[in-house]
């Protein structure tokens, strides 16, 4: 039932990416406890150096608590534009060297090397690619190489920072066996607590539980958990395509030059597709604004931006592009907004200046929109 082909999948993960970029810009930060995020007590930790993790600090932790755990930590505001550019640079390196890869997040990649062992040797080729990225980017990167995405990711997590680990085909279960159950990607605190209460602490013990029992206990996720505990994962590497987009446009019943109306529409449209971004757990790295005039002339303007899915940042840039593009002498027939260069990610990583309250506000807004529809709750400026 669960046949697993002999694939070769590498998982690349940039070590403490945000912190590493800051250390590249300022060598005095190397080896120091560094926190990236807002400096106020109500802000959250967007990223942290390995030196801080021994104090129990992790991303998304309240900054106030992080400073209490490690008072000597150096707090850096964060520069999403710089992180986005470094991510693009590394994406370009990988795209130039491998036939098939998936950009799983701003700092994480899956690379399908299946078949390349006949010509180059997958381990040798992966080593050389890693060294090229380190040389050209100046950043540390770790990788795991295995027969599927699951094992390669776990291997990377086990060997970080600045390491490399190959799990040969057939060794998936022995590799996983001694690890704790929370090492399985997707196993959160609640599932871990439930399993530990049952006396299941290692992946080996979990793999011995009959699949039917886990299904009865956890439903469909129990079946998936059994497969993962046994090293089985047939998830494909999804080709990375920068042209993938989310967009919307509106043709008006009457051509207009009413700036208040046009701005209201821009805000409403941006909110709508911004919600779609967050719903799909994606970030955008490029915005395009489109205007069609009453004479059917159509103009567009685009701008690369730091990866984000936050409405207040997207709306600001959309309005800037519109006003640079708009010819006030002409009636407007249509306007459109498009987001491209989409990558998986969570909008929280961009909220360096925002508080936990802001993050919770976005979560609450999205929750209401998912339940009642995207137009149920809007900003006052977009109300019609």
Image: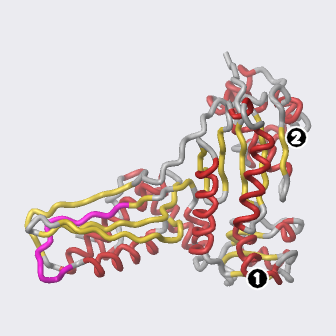
Which numbered disc, 2 or 1, marks the residue that appears first in the sequence?
A: 1
Q: Quarter of the image containing the N terminus?
A: top right
Q: Name the residue: 78% across, 32% down.
A: 229
Q: Is residue 291 magenta?
A: no
Asked which quadrant contains residue 145, the reply is top right
Indicate the position of residue 176 as horizontal and vertical percent values.
85, 35
Residue under circle 2? 179
Between 217 and 20, the residue placed more toward the observer is: 20
> Is residue 170 left or right of 255 when viewed as pictured?
right
Above or below: residue 138 compared with residue 11:
below
Between 183 and 128, the residue placed more toward the observer is: 128
Q: How is the image coloured?
A: secondary structure
Q: Between tags 2 and 1, which lies in front?
A: 1
Dot 2 and dot 1 residues touching (CB under 8 Å): no
Indicate the position of residue 92 as horizontal and vertical percent values.
58, 58
Q: Is mark 2 on a helix, strand or loop?
A: loop
Between 188 and 59, the residue placed more toward the observer is: 59
Q: Does the magenta stretch include residue 328?
A: yes
Q: Residue furthest top?
A: 1
Residue under circle 1? 26
Q: What element carries label 1?
A: loop
């Amino acid at each position: 039932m669960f046949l697993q082909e002999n694939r070769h999948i590498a998982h690349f993960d940039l070590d403490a990416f945000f912190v590493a970029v800051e250390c590249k810009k300022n060598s005095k930060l190397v080896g120091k406890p560094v926190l990236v995020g807002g400096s106020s007590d109500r802000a959250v930790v967007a990223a942290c150096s390995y030196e801080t993790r021994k104090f129990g600090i992790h991303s998304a932790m309240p900054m106030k608590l992080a400073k209490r755990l490690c008072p000597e930590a150096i707090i850096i505001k964060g520069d999403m534009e710089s992180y986005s550019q470094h991510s693009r640079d590394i994406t370009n390196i990988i795209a130039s060297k491998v036939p098939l890869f998936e950009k799983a997040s701003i700092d994480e990649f899956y690379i399908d090397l299946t078949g390349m062992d006949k010509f180059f040797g997958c381990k040798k080729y992966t080593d050389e690619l890693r060294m090229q990225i380190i040389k050209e980017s100046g950043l540390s990167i770790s990788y795991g190489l295995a027969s599927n995405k699951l094992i390669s990711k776990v291997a990377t997590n086990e060997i970080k920072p600045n390491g490399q680990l190959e799990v040969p085909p057939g060794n998936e279960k022995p590799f996983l066996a001694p690890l704790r159950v929370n090492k399985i990607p997707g196993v959160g605190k609640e599932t871990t607590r439930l399993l530990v209460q049952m006396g299941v602490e290692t992946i080996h013990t979990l793999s011995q539980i009959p699949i039917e029992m886990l299904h009865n206990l956890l439903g469909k996720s129990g079946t998936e958990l059994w497969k993962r505990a046994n090293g089985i994962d047939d998830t494909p590497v999804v080709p990375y395509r920068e042209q993938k987009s989310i967009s919307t446009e509106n043709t008006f019943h009457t051509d207009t030059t009413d700036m208040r109306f046009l701005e209201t529409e821009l805000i409403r449209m941006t909110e709508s597709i911004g919600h779609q971004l967050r719903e799909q757990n994606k970030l955008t790295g490029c915005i395009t604004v489109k205007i069609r005039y009453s004479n059917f002339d159509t103009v567009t303007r685009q701008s690369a931006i730091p990866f984000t899915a936050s409405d207040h940042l997207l709306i600001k840039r959309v309005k800037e592009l519109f006003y640079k593009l708009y010819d006030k002498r002409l009636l407007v027939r249509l306007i459109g907004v498009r987001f491209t260069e989409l990558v998986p990610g969570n909008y929280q990583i961009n909220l360096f200046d925002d508080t936990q309250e802001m993050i919770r506000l976005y979560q609450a807004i999205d929750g209401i929109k998912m339940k009642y529809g995207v137009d149920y709750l809007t900003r006052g400026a977009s109300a019609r």
